[in-house]
């Protein structure tokens, strides 16, 4: 049974974020950092392991990303995602054609759009289509095979549909961003849709919060140079920041 992440305490959330960013942690280092016993850290890691994205090892833990169901991700970093969604929505100009893929942050873009806004949105996400329908925004769905975990349509029908379209802008979520692996996603079928959207769009913006920086998950769908802009809650630093600058990726921090 997957453990509810809402039950984690503040230290456990911070440890999970550190594991997600670095890929691996040591119990001794965590004990020193947080000023608690190694036994306490072991109990923290045991609880995090129940969440499915952390695996304990001898003396530490590693990050093992799983395809988290949409309902399990909805409450995580919600304030940041709302701000990111508003910032991204402000980029869209009247008359543009826009692709929004499935995800908790791209859903916030749909929620930030004005009712009756004169744009055309293409999406492969059922919940985003429902949100736009309530705002009388012209919306096209791709069709395809339904992934219940994310409310997204994927597979050959979705891919074929997208391949025949062109977009002024594509807004995509990502579960990982690293210098070498680029933008990545844990689901092979969703990554395929993202890859096609990047190819068919004049400009691609990736929306993601700071916890995705440094993470390398299963499938890379775009290199840094393939994306025009990242909208996030905090800018990356270190090597990732330099790599983004070299690839001329614009970093926009949502206020």
Image (cartoon, grey):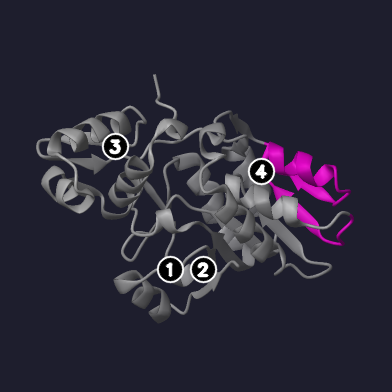
Question: Magenta residues, as a range?
Answer: 116-143
Residue 237 appears in view: yes
Q: Identify the residue shown where x is 37% and y is 31%.
A: 51
Q: Earlier in the sequence, mark 3 or mark 2?
A: 3
The residue at the far front in this view is 35
Q: Is residue 225 left or right of residue 117?
A: left
Q: Earlier in the sequence, mark 4 or mark 1?
A: 4
For the residues marked 3 and 2, what is the alpha-carbon distance in whole angstroms? Answer: 29 Å
Q: Earlier in the sequence, mark 4 or mark 3?
A: 3
Mark 3 element type:
strand
- The quarter in which the N terminus is drawn is top left
Q: Residues within 10 Å of mark 1 (few under 14, many from 20)?
A: many
Q: Which mark is residue 224?
A: 1
Q: Identify the residue shown where x is 15% and y is 43%.
A: 27
Q: Is residue 141 magenta?
A: yes
Q: Identify the residue shown where x is 70% and y is 38%.
A: 127
Q: Which mark is residue 128?
A: none
Mark 1 element type:
helix
For the residues marked 4 and 1, what is the alpha-carbon distance in whole angstroms? Answer: 23 Å
Query: Residue tagged by mark 3?
Result: 54
For the residues marked 4 and 3, what is the alpha-carbon distance in whole angstroms? Answer: 29 Å
In this orientation, which residue lies closer to the viewer: 178 or 113? 113
Query: Residue tagged by mark 4?
Result: 124
For the residues marked 3 and 1, what is the alpha-carbon distance in whole angstroms? Answer: 27 Å
- Residue 69 placed where, x, y %? 51, 32
- Residue 78 placed where, x, y %? 57, 48
């Amino acid at each position: 049974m997957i453990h509810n992440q809402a039950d984690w305490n503040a230290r456990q959330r911070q440890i999970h974020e550190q594991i997600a960013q670095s890929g691996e942690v040591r119990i001794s280092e965590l004990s020193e950092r947080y000023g608690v016993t190694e036994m306490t850290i072991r109990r923290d890691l045991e609880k995090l392991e129940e969440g499915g994205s952390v695996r304990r090892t001898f003396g530490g833990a590693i990050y093992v990303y799983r395809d988290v169901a949409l309902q399990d991700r909805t409450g995580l970093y919600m304030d940041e995602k709302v701000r990111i969604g508003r910032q991204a929505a402000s980029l869209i100009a009247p008359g543009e054609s826009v692709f929004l893929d499935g995800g908790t942050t791209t859903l916030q873009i749909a929620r930030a759009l004005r009712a009756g806004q004169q744009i055309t949105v293409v999406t492969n996400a059922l919940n985003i289509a429902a949100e736009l329908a309530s705002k009388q925004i012209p919306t096209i769905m791709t069709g395809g095979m339904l992934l219940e975990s994310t409310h997204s349509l994927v597979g050959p029908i979705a891919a074929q549909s997208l391949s025949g379209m062109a977009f002024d802008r594509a807004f995509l979520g990502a579960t990982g961003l690293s210098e070498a692996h680029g933008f990545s996603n844990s689901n092979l079928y969703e990554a395929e849709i993202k890859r096609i959207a990047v190819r068919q769009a004049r400009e691609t913006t990736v929306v993601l919060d700071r916890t995705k920086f440094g993470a390398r998950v299963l499938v890379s769908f775009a290199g840094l140079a393939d994306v025009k802009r990242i909208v996030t809650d905090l800018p990356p630093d270190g090597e990732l920041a330099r790599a983004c600058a070299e690839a001329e990726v614009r970093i926009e921090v949502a206020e």
